[in-house]
């Protein structure tokens, strides 16, 4: 046998490494609380009956990246690894090579993303793309366009990171009850439209220091005379970074969160001269683009000035980062190209994506919105294969804008509207489900009414129970004829309630942590 | 019957015969007369565009089956006509860069393709140097697969990279000459050399090529051309050529005092960049757009232009607009000097700029419009009744050129084909 395994086949794929971070999902409690002993990872929570992590992974696949490093908590490793490497047709990634690594953290003591990255920086040997597991990309945006912008800018200009912000959807008032959490707050950013550079991101520290004003440096404004300021956009947490960014990260030990602290700090490198001088050596270890200097000198559309045009006069004559490259003088033979290296800008590029529906499903309102968005895109059709078809009773009414998973049994005279029902559920007779999300394996008794609720996996709802805008933890059992409005139902309350009267139960809305309990 | 109608009939009969032979699907036969009939009335008196649109060229639709090439081209043409595509120059409609590189393309080539497609690196010399530099990287990263030799396999490996570059932007003549020379060196390299030595030797040869045929050639051209510039001269140049720019700067540094008129045109507005460089060197300049040329041509003493490539019949293939400048200058007896290295020489004969050309992409690649105008009001995109056409190159006939300055001497345009002889058949 002749294996033609030439290393050159791996050339293109070695360009980028995708780093996908899967966290606990503390904002999605109780959906992400444990189901008995087993954890419910946030990454596997379904949106429109597909696990959340499918979306960024298919997005990656389409852009041609093949190496993926997936970092998740130790407790979630087996489930996530099983999902990714299993061969089911719905979730197979033929061209992705996913390496699942774990990081020790517990649900109570979450670690910042910077720490996690520093821990795994030895595994990252090339330019990388940092992605969250919960980003649902908008339909019009491809990762390739983000990568292309990074490729061009890092070679031409010395840009270090390319970020992506998308237009946030404001959910309507009253669509989500208040104690489910609110949509993420709007963060004002300042960016330059013409060159696509991110200039300033308001951090929480800035907000604490001065909540009413936005403080900008004059050096920013003197470099970029025309900038845009907006708070309409949300950070997608997709960053295409140079490898040397990790070296800078190691030098800054005080940063905990990549998105909240490190990226706003990186934006400042571009126009704050002291920071630039301190870190330019780390960020540009080798003159990798020296080979293109000669070509650029001959290029007809290149004028040798960096973005922002005006350079403040600099008295240090030997720092190559500040001299605008002149094109005068005869080009020297290629042996002597030390002079006139184009100024490296160390800027953070930005793509602002308008239109399309996108979201980060790390909080409940966005999760609901995303489900609703995907429902609006599909129309329901009764399943074609006879086995599934027989499970759905003829006399049930399933509206066009619902989604029902495979092998779900629906009883007669049941109405399902605007809902997502997972796989292997059992819905009894005369049930009314409006605007709900039922995860897999739920059991709903006859005559129950569910309105605007999210039921975790394996939830059992007794007969004639009524749930209005409730959230249940996986494995919860609602008693027959129970009635709950606007509550988060967790198993700890349920076992506590078991000891009391079996009639009405009071439950705290998410006050205590969940505890492992056996029946 | 007019000439055009007769040609139509001939085409129809030829197409019918061809479909009978190659058993192509019936639609082309039916559609072709239908398509050619609407194209007939608008161009009854201009056979040239018709000839151009039926000439060989890359079919925008992609795959052709070789033998049915004419039919497939007509299918592609029909598709373009039906989709209200361009009536002329449709045979080099822009191809978009593929999302994934086909085959095993080095990331540096992907970057380079992006730079080409976005016009970050443009100009014949710049593209050639960039390509060769990236090829050095590719060669260094290359490992010979087992059961194969470097001399045999490296060429195929490079061909994959080259096809990716060509999909980003059509190949320049300079790139073609350089690549031909490189492939010659590769196939001529010693089979017994250890791999790293062979690779180093190739990189060294690439460096030598850049140094000899571009850098040093540019210096020789500068020395020769600066002799043609005298004190008090008024020089005219068009758009931006790296060679002409160096000539002007060198002449100024030597102490000759002259002034420059920079003529520019949309959409690339390269003259603006040249202007910024010349003004930085304190050369007195005037900037004008191409339509204003007639008003100033009487004051000009010499015209210096660059070239993308130069052909055996002496025609110069250069940025669109150069032909106008050259012809107008000739009309007013102003000498036109083309500064061009010998590696830009192309063996073929080019008679017009329809058969081979390139269209600039629509959209705001060159940021040529002022920022103060609202973006929506500026015509940058095609609309239902408007197609935007920006050919990038045109052909200057040899009759309008006074002299070509190369590194082997100053040559009248009729003797261009003697360049290979002068170089000892190295081209």
Image: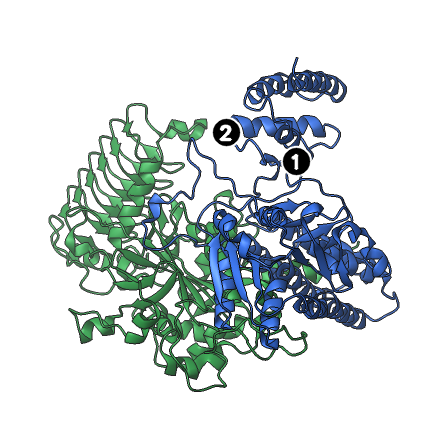
Chain B: drawing colour: blue
Secondary structure of the residue carrying numbered label 2 = loop
For the C terminus of chain A, the quadrant is bottom left
- Residue A10 appears in the picture as rendered: yes
Q: Residue at x 52, y 60 (%)?
A: B261
Query: Upstream in the sequence, badge 2 or badge 1?
Result: 1
Residue indicated by mark 1 = B63
Instruction: Say whether residue B120 is left or right of residue B316.
Output: left
Note whether A471 is above or below A403 in the view shown.
below
**Residue sitting nearer the eye, B48 or B108:** B48
In this rendering, the label closer to the viewer, 2 or 1:
2
Residue indicated by mark 2 = B84
Badge 2 sits on which subunit? B
Q: Quadrant of residue B9?
A: top right
Label 2, label 1: how far apart the Cα atoms are: 21 Å
Chain A: drawing colour: green
**Residue sitting nearer the eye, A518 or B287:** B287
């Amino acid at each position: 046998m002749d294996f033609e395994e030439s290393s050159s086949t791996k050339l293109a794929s070695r360009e980028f490494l995708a780093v996908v971070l899967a966290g606990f999902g503390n904002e999605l409690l109780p959906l992400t609380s444990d189901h008995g002993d087993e954890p419910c990872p946030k990454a596997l929570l379904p949106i429109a009956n597909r696990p959340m992590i499918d979306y960024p992974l298919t997005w990656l696949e389409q852009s041609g990246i093949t190496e993926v490093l997936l970092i998740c908590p130790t407790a979630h490793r087996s489930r996530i690894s099983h999902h990714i490497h299993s061969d089911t047709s719905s979730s197979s990634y033929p061209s992705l090579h996913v390496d699942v690594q774990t990081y020790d953290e517990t649900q109570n003591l979450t670690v910042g993303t910077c720490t996690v990255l520093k821990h795994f920086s030895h595994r990252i040997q090339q330019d990388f793309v940092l992605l969250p597991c919960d980003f649902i990309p908008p339909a019009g945006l491809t990762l390739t366009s983000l990568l292309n912008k990074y490729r061009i800018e890092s070679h031409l200009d010395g840009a270090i990171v390319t970020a992506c912000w998308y237009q946030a959807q404001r959910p309507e008032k009253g669509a989500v009850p208040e104690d489910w959490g609110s949509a993420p707050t709007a963060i004002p950013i300042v960016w330059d439209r013409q060159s696509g550079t991110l200039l300033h991101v308001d951090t929480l520290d800035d907000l604490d220091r001065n909540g009413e004003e936005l403080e900008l440096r004059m050096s920013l404004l003197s470099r970029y005379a025309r900038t845009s300021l907006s708070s309409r956009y949300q950070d997608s947490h997709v960053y295409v970074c140079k490898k040397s960014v990790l070296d800078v990260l190691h030098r800054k030990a005080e940063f905990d969160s990549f998105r909240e602290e490190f990226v706003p700090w990186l934006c400042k490198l571009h126009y704050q001269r002291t920071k630039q001088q301190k870190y330019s050596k780390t960020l540009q270890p080798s003159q990798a683009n020296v080979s293109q200097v000669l070509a650029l000198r001959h290029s007809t559309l290149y004028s040798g000035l960096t973005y922002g045009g005006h350079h403040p006069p600099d008295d240090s004559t030997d720092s190559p980062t500040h001299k605008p490259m002149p094109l005068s003088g005869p080009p020297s033979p290629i042996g002597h190209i030390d002079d006139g290296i184009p100024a490296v800008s160390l800027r953070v590029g930005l793509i602002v994506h308008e239109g399309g529906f996108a979201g980060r499903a790390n909080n409940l309102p966005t999760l609901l919105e995303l489900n609703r968005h995907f429902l609006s895109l599909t129309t329901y059709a009764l399943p074609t294969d006879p086995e599934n078809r027989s499970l759905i009773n003829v006399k049930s009414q399933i509206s066009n804008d619902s989604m029902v998973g495979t092998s779900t049994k629906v009883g007669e005279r049941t109405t399902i509207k605007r809902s997502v029902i997972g796989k292997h559920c059992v819905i009894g007779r005369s049930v009314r489900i409006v605007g709900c999300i039922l995860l897999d394996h739920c059991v709903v008794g006859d005559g129950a009414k569910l309105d605007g609720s999210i039921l975790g996996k394996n939830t059992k709802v007794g007969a004639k129970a009524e749930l209005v805008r409730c959230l249940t933890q996986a494995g919860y059992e609602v008693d027959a004829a129970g009635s709950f409005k606007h509550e988060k139902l967790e198993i700890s309350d349920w076992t506590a309630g078991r000891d009391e009267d079996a009639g009405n139960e009071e439950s705290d809305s998410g006050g205590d942590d969940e505890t492992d309990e056996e029946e | 019957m007019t000439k055009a109608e007769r040609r139509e009939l001939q085409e129809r009969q030829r197409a019918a015969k061809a479909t009978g032979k190659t058993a192509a699907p019936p639609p082309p036969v039916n559609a072709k007369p239908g398509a050619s009939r609407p194209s007939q009335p608008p161009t009854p008196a201009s056979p040239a565009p018709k000839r151009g649109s039926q000439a060989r060229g890359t079919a925008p639709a992609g795959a052709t089956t070789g033998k049915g090439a004419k039919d497939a081209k007509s299918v592609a043409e029909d598709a373009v006509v039906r989709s209200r595509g361009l009536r002329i120059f449709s045979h080099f409609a822009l191809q978009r860069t593929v999302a994934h590189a086909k085959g095993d393309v080095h990331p540096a080539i992907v970057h380079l393709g992006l730079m080409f497609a976005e016009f970050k690196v443009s100009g014949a010399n710049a593209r050639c140097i960039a390509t060769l530099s990236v090829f050095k990287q590719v060669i260094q990263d290359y490992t010979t697969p087992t059961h194969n030799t470097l001399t045999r396999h490296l060429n195929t490996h490079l061909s994959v990279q080259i096809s990716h570059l060509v999909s980003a932007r059509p190949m320049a003549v300079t790139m073609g000459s350089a690549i031909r020379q490189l492939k010659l060196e590769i196939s001529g390299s010693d089979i017994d050399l250890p791999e790293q030595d062979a690779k180093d030797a190739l990189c060294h040869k690439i460096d030598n090529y850049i140094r000899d045929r571009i850098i040093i050639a540019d210096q020789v051209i500068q020395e020769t051309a600066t002799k043609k510039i005298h004190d008090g001269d008024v020089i005219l140049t068009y758009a931006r050529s790296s060679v002409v720019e160096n000539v002007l700067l060198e002449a100024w540094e030597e102490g000759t005092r002259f002034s420059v008129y920079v003529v520019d045109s949309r959409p690339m507005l390269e003259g603006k960049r040249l202007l910024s460089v010349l003004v930085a060197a304190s050369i007195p300049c005037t900037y004008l757009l191409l339509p204003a040329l007639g008003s100033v041509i009487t004051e000009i003493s010499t015209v210096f232009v660059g070239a993308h490539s130069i052909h055996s019949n002496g025609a110069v293939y250069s940025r669109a607009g150069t032909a106008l400048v050259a012809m107008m200058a000739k009309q007013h007896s102003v000498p036109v000097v083309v500064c061009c290295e010998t590696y830009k020489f192309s063996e073929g004969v080019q008679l017009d700029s329809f058969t081979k050309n390139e269209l600039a992409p629509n959209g705001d690649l060159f940021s040529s419009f002022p920022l103060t105008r609202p973006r929506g009001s500026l015509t940058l995109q095609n609309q239902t009744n408007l197609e935007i056409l920006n050919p990038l190159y045109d052909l200057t006939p040899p009759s309008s050129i006074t002299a070509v300055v190369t590194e082997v001497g100053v040559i009248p345009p009729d003797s261009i084909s003697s360049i290979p002889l002068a170089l000892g058949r190295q081209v």
